Structure formats: C-alpha cells, structure tokens
Amino acid sequence: MTGNTNKNTGSHPFIELKDLSKHFGDFVAVDTVNLQIGRGELFSILGASGCGKTTLLRMMAGFETPTSGRIFIDGVDVTDQAPYQRPVNMMFQSYAIFPHMTVEKNVAYGLEKDRVSKGEIKTRVSEILELVQLTRFSKRKPNQLSGGERQRVALARALVKRPKVLLLDEPLAALDKKLREHTQFELMNIQDELGITFVVVTHDQEEAMILSSRIAVMEKGRFEQVGTPKEVYEYPDNRFVADFIGTINMFEGTVETAGDGSISVASDEAGAPLTGLTDRIMENGVKVCIAVRPEKIFISQHEPENQEDTCLPGVVEDLGYFGNLSLYRIRLDSGKIVQVSAQNRRRSAERFLEWDDRVFISWPPRSAIVLTE
Amino acid sequence: MNRKTSRFVLSVLAFGYAFLYIPLASVIVYSFNDSRLATVWGGFSTRWYGELLRNEQVLDAAFLSLRIAVTTATFATIFGTMAGMALSRFGGFRGRTLFAGMIISPLVMPEVITGLSLLLLFISLQQLIGWPAHRGFTTITIAHTTFAMAYVTVIIQSRLSGMDQSLEEAAMDLGGRPLRVVFDITLPLIAPAMVAGWLLAFTLSLDDLVIATFVSGPGGSTLPMLIFSKVKLGVTPDINALATLIILFVSISVIVAWYAMRRMQRQTEKNMQTAAK
Ligand SMILES: Nc1ncnc2c1ncn2[C@@H]1O[C@H](COP(=O)(O)OP(=O)(O)OP(=O)(O)O)[C@@H](O)[C@H]1O
Ligand SMILES: [Mg+2]
C-alpha cells in the first residue's frame, strides 16, 4: 500500500476499520478490510458493481452486523451501536425521502428525534435549505420535485444533524451528466464549508478522481489499493488497479537484467526490450508487466534519437480525431495493439498521421510502470 | 375476432351478469312490494322497512352483528398489521415459515373445521378456567378475528414488500428508535392498506354464517343467523327489506375499500417512480 500523504490525517485516524468482514452465508461480500480515514477527508470507495461497496457502507452506518472485525469512529468502538446511536448519517442510493412529509419536515426529522428545541430546528432547517438552494421548495412534497432537487433534499436531511461522518452511496448516480458535474462541485464546497468527513461510494472513476482526497479501489470485497487520486493513477500497485483506473497498455514479459533501480524486460508482445524503473529488488527471469498510459507515449514518423527511451515501430491501425486530442491504435509487428493519445500540436513541417502510416512510438523509462502482481 | 364469436362472448357475459344480479335486483324490487306474499306484486310500498325497524329481534341481531364486525375489524387490523410487519421486516427469524403458514392457513381451511375447532376450544376453556361463561359476542368476535386477521396480514404484507425498506433505515439513521420509526414512517405509509384491511375484515365478519353458528350460544344470534333461521320458515317480505339494506351497506363498504386500495396503489407507483428517477 502507498503511504498516506493526506494533510488532514491527525494523530489518530478519525475512522478506523479493523479486519472488517461480512459474509452472507458462504458468500464473502467484504473480506478483511483495514482502513484509516482522517478527519475532514473526502474519501471515495471505487469499484465495479457487486464488489461490496454498499455492504461496507451499511456496516459503517450500522445496518449490517459485521461477521468479524471492529469499526472505530473518533476513537470510539461503534461496532455494537445501533444506527440511531452512531454519529454517522447516510445518504441512500435511492435517496429514501419520506414521501408523506414536505421537504421541510423531511429535513427537520432528524433534529426532532434529537429533541432539539423548536426555534433551533427552524433556524437550522432554513440554514441548510439555503445551503442546498431549496428554500423555495420547503413546503413541497417529494413527488413534486425533480431528481436533482430530491437528491439535494436527501443531502440536506443528512447534513442538518451535523454528523461527524457522512456516508454517501452513489450520491450522483441518478443525475444527468451536466447536473452531476455541477453537484460534484457543490458537494466539495459543502464539504469544505462544514468540515464533515465524507465517505463516498461510487463506480464512476472520473467522479472519484475529481472529488476525493483519497480513493480506495475495491474488488471482490477487498481493497486493491488505497491512495490519492494521483497515486492510484500514476503508481498503481497491481494489474487490476492499473487496468481499472483509466486506460493503459500492458506488456507481459520476464526480467532480463536488473540492477541500479532499473530493469530490462524481454517481452514478445513488444518485440524489443523494455526498460522500467523500480526500487524493488528483482531476480532475473521473474514475470513482470510493463504498463504505459496512452498519454505518456510519443508518436512520430521518424525514429527518435534519444537512446534511453523505449522505441517500438508500428503501423497506424485506427485513429480518432477529437479536436484538441487524437487517439491512435498502433499495431506493433508482434500484432499487439497499443493505444496512444496525443495533443494536436501541429508543427509546420509535419503532416497529420493517416491510416497505415509507419510510425515509431516511444516513451522514457520513468513513464513505464512496473507491475509484479 | 369475428362477429359470430363476439356475439357469443357477449351473450355469455350477459348471461353471467344476469345470473349474478337478477336475484339481487329481484330482492330489492320485492322489498318494496306491498303484498304479504313474497312472490306476488301488490303495489309499491315501504311498509316492510317500517316494520323492520319495529322488529326487536331483527334490530338486536343487526346491532350484535355490527358490534362484532367493528370489534373484529379493529382487532384483526391491529394483529394483522403486526403479523405483516413481522413477516416482511424482521428477515429470516427462526420458525418464520411455520409462522407464515399458520397465519395464512385460515384462508384455505374449510369454515366448518375452523368453527368446530374453535367451539371445542371454547368448551374446554370453559371447563378448565370457567371462561368464556357463555357463548355469544366474545366468542364470535374471537373466532372472526382469527380468520379475518389472515386476510389483513396478506394485504399489509404485500403493501410492505412494495415499499422501499431504506425509508425506515433512513429514519433510524436520523436518530429514530425502531418503535418511533414504525409510528413516524411505516404506519402512515401503510395507512391506506390498513383501511382496506379493516373494511375487508368488517365485511367478512358481517357476512359470516358458518363459524358464527358454531361458536354462538343461546340468545346470541347474528344477522346472517337470524335471516337463515327465518328463511327456513318461508321467505317474508321484511327479509327482502333487510337484505336490501345489507346490500346497500356492503356496496358502500366495498366502494370505500376499493377507493382506499386505488389510492394505495397510486402511492406505490408514485414512490416507485420517485425511486427510479
Ligand atoms: N442481504 C444479502 N444477502 C446475500 N447477499 C448479499 C446481500 N446483500 C448484498 N449481497 C451480495 O453482496 C455483494 C456485494 O453487494 P453490494 O450491494 O455491497 O455491492 P455494491 O458494490 O454496492 O454494488 P453496486 O455498485 O451494484 O451497488 C453482491 O454480490 C450481493 O449480491
Ligand atoms: Mg451499491
């Protein structure tokens, strides 16, 4: 795992999951998860459908009893506390707005249960409705609201109690692209303003990248990697994470020579030795994978002069023009297809690449990611 | 569909409806018959309705039936709602299947068996603990509650299974204790189903002849029992008048129940749309 570089992490973690597991009969939905989240973080759990994200969140909220393991929030073991005792509020995947209550009543519900005085309820509800820009709709019933408005009611209802932790299960999944982008920033602003720790579940990696201070990539009930968006993207721990986040080209091979923090890998797929940088001690003959992101690859019709860089010849199989950006699919001599994306900075002497052009793709050793798992 | 079959279908339909409603219509028409003979038309009159209102026996029976029906409906709704919640909200508790089966079984049990077994229960209870001292209102109400509750349970359970469970979880998450959540969220949302269940239990109890006959004692005649015993001595016009009143009463209940059900269905659809958006 990558070291935690988050600025907000204090002396002790704010949320701590210790060896948390959940089994449904024989099926393991969450498998010995260990996690520490700092105060005020916006932490995302990212994973494919059915990997156990909701189950993990429901254990934190108290709706599922862990099969084993403990949950600590602000130093208190809450594993055996009922949902209504935990300093945690959840925003449900389905929003779960009470259909028989007005917007105002929905938001006030949590405060009423806490026996907050009438006057204070009034001010706090109107404050939070102001924050999510719903003041105009306070007297409406939920079925008179649009999807985005309903989502904001759910957010206001969870925020008004000023919980220590807010859990959000796919908060933006039901919104269209434009509204989603708008709401992402709203969410970040609100989180900044109130300083509440957010744990967001999502299967939209772009959303996770934009929103989060850190991301956990989850697969089959386990965490594959936890780190900042940059760490997860630039330095994936293993093949799964590299493949799951963004697009990547992978070359399977075996270590030929190793030493001095750099290795040379023989790969049939590449057809030429590949160089990669790694701190790990590697034996010759070990199976590794060299992975390169499409935007780290240079493409040119002339062989580059720099001898350090890895350089492979190929043919343009397919290309897509996206205005500022072009995407190429290059077929190497081995038959392997490599994806390359390049900024369209036209240099005067050069012409645009066309189908079936012979090209050279190259990248410096530091752009290559060495994966062993 | 060609013309021939459509005519055939239409006549079958007409025949079916005639079979169902002509007897009812004739009862209503003859209730306004001035003649003492039930089958001879002697001019229009409302005298039998007046006579009915002066007949102590009929009034007593009607009053008893109503009291039983109201009490039954109320208890059946309370217990049925509790059973429905247990079945659809408490997950797989131990003995759940047995519990579900036992609650639903009065729906399929022949009434004669239900009546007989309850009668035996009441008799042995009386011998053991001296209660119930005599059979009548109490015993009939208990008997009716046991079977009417099964119907209410089914209605409530189907309503709850169509309702998003995260609503209750959300309320609990916001600090509502489980019992509070039931009153704040669950009950308001299933209220139309409870109204429908109450009305169904009410009509079931008002209708019942077989079970009531088994578990009632001397002097405890419900309206159906009274009508049945009177008819054995020949159909009199005042029975027609009584039947007309009952038809009116039941029709109103059914319409109200249907309306409540429709509202509940609309609400469910609306909630689903809300969730889907
Ligand atoms: N009550 C349950 N009983 C049995 N299996 C369950 C139960 N709840 C969840 N599961 C299983 O656990 C796995 C994880 O479910 P979970 O809801 O956590 O997935 P998720 O990561 O939230 O997926 P999605 O992105 O589709 O919401 C799934 O395979 C699911 O079938
Ligand atoms: Mg989920």
Image (spheres, coloured by chain):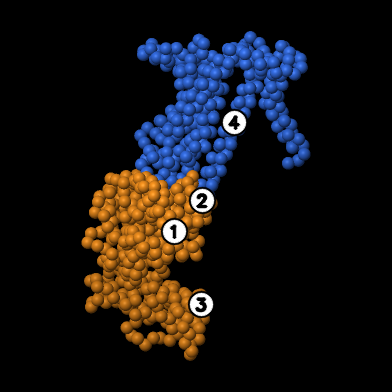
Identify the disc placed on residue B184. none
Tint applied to chain A in the drawing: orange
Q: Is residue A292 above or below residue B277?
A: below
Q: Is residue A85 left or right of residue B81?
A: left
Report crowding for label 2: few under 14, some 14 to 19, many 20 or more residues within 10 A (C-alpha). Answer: some
Figure label count:
4
Tint applied to chain B in the drawing: blue
Instruction: Answer yes or no: is residue B229 visible.
Output: yes
Judge by depth and name the residue closer to the eye, B185 or A126: A126
Which residue lies under the disc numbered 3?
A323
The secondary structure type at the circle numbered 3 is: loop
Lower position in the chain sequence, tag 3 or tag 2? 2
The secondary structure type at the circle numbered 1 is: helix
Task: Identify the residue at horizontal 51%, vertical 30% (top origin).
Answer: B198
Lower position in the chain sequence, tag 3 or tag 1? 1
Mark 4–mark 3 Cα distance, whole angstroms, equals 67 Å
Mark 1–mark 4 Cα distance, whole angstroms, equals 47 Å
Which residue lies under the disc numbered 2?
A140
Q: Is residue A331 above or below residue B160?
A: below
Task: Identify the residue at horizontal 57%, vertical 33% (top origin).
Answer: B257
Ligand 1 lies under 8 Å from the Cβ of mark 4? no
The answer to whether the residues at label 1 and label 2 have Cβ atoms under 8 Å apart is: no
> Do marks 1 and 4 share a subunit?
no
> Do marks 3 and 2 share a subunit?
yes
Judge by depth and name the residue closer to the eye, B233 or A145: A145
Amino acid under label 1?
Glu
Task: Identify the residue at horizontal 48%, vertical 35% (top origin).
Answer: B156
Ligand 2 lies under 8 Å from the Cβ of mark 2? no
Instruction: Answer yes or no: is residue B106 visible.
Output: no
Identify the disc placed on residue B254. 4
